[in-house]
Structures are given as structure tokens and as C-alpha cells.
Amino acid sequence: MNRVFNFSAGPSMLPLPVLETAAAELVCYKDSGMSVMEMSHRSPAYEEIITAAQATLRSLMQIPDNYKVLFMQGGASTQFACVPLNLMKTGKADYVLSGQFSTKAYKEALKYGDAQAVASSKDENFSKIPALTRDTFRPDTDYVHVCYNNTIYGTKYNAIPDTGDIPLVADMSSCIISEPVDVSKFGVIYAGAQKNMAPAGVTVVIVREDLLGNARPETPSMLDWKLMADNDSMYNTPPCYSIYMLKLVCEWVQSIGGLEAMKKRNQEKAALLYDYLDSQDYYIAPVDPAFRSMMNVTFVTGDADLDKKFAAEAGAAGLKNLKGHRSVGGMRASIYNAMPIEGVETLVAFMKKFAAENPKQ
């Protein structure tokens, strides 16, 4: 059976060379005599894997030496609790609401202190990123939290918010390693792996060292960033195979030229789709062009029945998982790093054909 173009928002497609390497090493990893899924996380073979995974990610993202890289579990949603548990020293936190996941993070933080939604684009159906200035944030807040790319609505920050000396915390689950980012501008970056880095199971947390050691007394051990850092992410058995896959993905990105080359590839894919959307009036792209995501492109026909027919026929044509999120409707094409430009070209050709064959009433 031929592989399809998988536009799923997550878990999403992985680079074919990575899958082929993983397949070749599935039964026996190098000369270990066993699969990575079978080996002890304390074995020399696995310690080599996890060390290489961290080193490769550090190199790829140019993570400064004064940041720790943690491999945790529970997805980005667990970090919604980890962030206030580890950073709320005075009990205040400012949240920018730009979509569903930033809203969920905000609601979780309300359990632990004075979390305040200082800006929101909900009234505009999250079609843009709220306007922010340094004055948006309380001067005595412990941190500012943002979701950098909004998977469901297809928006992205076009600049890093200026928070001054206040630590900036960013959920980058759906855009990490898609382009260069100045890590030093953030106090914490976290990301679930299943969109751009690896299969579900591992969550990457990049945290500045001076922010460690402030966990609230009630913080569970597994959610304490300092404890994880002190134990090299192996306080307990880590998600071994997902970390191995993350290592392979990072090596693949390096092999094609690193994050600058990846950004160029992603810009070309996104431009191909957005240029078509802007050239016609059959499909509607609801996102403010100033905040369009390179990773998640949303569009609708304006007719729910046509949208449903589009998703079904696209799936039958090998363009899978284009149905929009249930809270938004329409279509969503997630074109993460692993999506080849041929997939976007095939999608645009299908969109043209569908529009010609299904005139609106």
C-alpha cells in the first residue's frame, strides 16, 4: 500500500528517512542485540541515545548553556500545571489567550494562584494574535504565558512578545524546530513531540537555570523541573522510544541544512497554499494574514455540507485528515516539517478540481 499525504494536526506524519532508519533498527539497535523498546534506560546503549538526543536538539536550536533540556511525560497539557507549580512564587501569572490550548493552560493556572487573562482574541474567533505591549503585563507577575502557534485556529505570533524582565513561557508544541527561534528571549519553552518532533510520549521542556528550584511544596515529584534536571530526565523510566525517535528527527533536520533550511522549506509550502487561497473566492481563509501559521492552514467553503464532502473526497484521494477541528469546522491542513512540498501541490490541485466540480448554490 502506498503512503498517503497525512495532514493530521497530531499525531502527525514523520519524515520517511526517519521511519526507514527506525524500521531498520526496530528489532536490533546497532550491536545491542535488542530493540530500543526493550533496553534498560540505564544501559550504556540507551544513555548514549538520550545524551545524543539532547545534544542534537541543543545544537539544532542553539540552546544557550544556561538552559536545561528536560524530557518529560504527560504531553504539553501536563505542562499547563507544571508551569504554575514551578514558577508561581508570588502567586501571579499573566496569560495571553489566542486559542484553545492557551485557554486550557490559563484555566489550569487558575487552580494555583492569581492567573489573569491580560489579552484575548476570543471575540474575533481567535483569528489573530492579540495586540501586546510591555504595558499589557503586570509588573509584579511571575511569568507571562503564550501559545506560540495555534494548531486549531491556524495563527502564530509574528514577533516574540516583549515582557522585559518577566520570564516568558511559550507552548511551542506545533511549531518547534520549524524555524530558528532565539531561545534566550524565553524563560521556558515546552512542546509535546507528536506534531513536529517524534511520536507521542515525550514532552520537551527547555528552562532557564535560574528558574529552577522554586517548585511549590505540593508539586508532585514527577512535575518538578529541578528534580528532573538533577536526574538527567531519568528520575523514573523515560519515554525511551519517543526520545530515540526525537533524536532521529533532529538528525534528519540537521542533514538537510538545519533550521534555516527548514524555515525556507516551510515558507515555500505555506506560500503555495496561501497564495492559492488568496487568488480565488471559493475557499475562505479566516485568519488575519499578519498572523498566519506556517504549520496549520485553516480554510472553509462557507457551506458545512460542502466542507464535509471535501474532507471525505480528499481522504479517498489520499489526502488524509483534512477535516477541521470540531470546535471550528471547515478544513485544516497541517503541513509540518515532514510534509513534502509534493503533498501541498497535490492538495492545491485537488482544491481546484473540487471547486470546479462543486459550484456553490
Image (cartoon, rainbow, N blue to C red):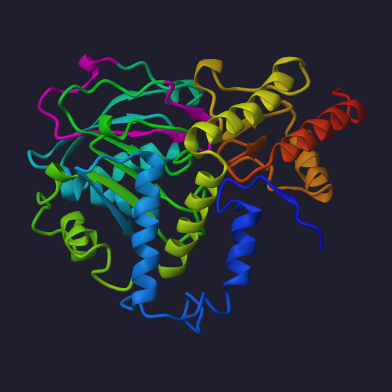
Seen at 42% across and 25% down, the residue is: 157
Q: Does 344 sit left or right of 242 as displayed? A: right
Which residue is at the far front?
31
Residue 229 position (above or below residue 300): below
- Residue 88 location in percent, x, y? 14, 42
- Looking at the rendered structure, the number of numbered marks drawn on it comes to 0
Res 97 seen here: yes
Q: On the rendered image, what quadrant is the N terminus found in?
A: bottom right
**Start and end of the magenta stretch?**
133-158
Seen at 10% across and 53% down, the residue is: 216
Q: Is residue 182 magenta?
A: no
- Residue 117 location in percent, x, y? 28, 29
Res 112 seen here: no
Quick one: 289 or 104, which is closer to the camera?
A: 289
Seen at 27% across and 63% down, the residue is: 233
Q: Does 214 sit left or right of 290 as displayed? A: left
- Residue 22 location in percent, x, y? 58, 66
Residue 243 position (above or below residue 55): below
Quick one: 107 or 172, which is closer to the camera?
A: 172
Q: On the rendered image, what quadrant is the C terminus found in?
A: top right
Examine the image and state in which quarter residue 173 appears: top left
Which residue is at the far right?
357
Q: Does 39 sit left or right of 72 as displayed? A: right
- Residue 120 location in percent, x, y? 37, 24
Q: Is residue 143 magenta?
A: yes
Seen at 39% across and 57% down, the residue is: 53
Residue 192 position (above or below residue 322): below
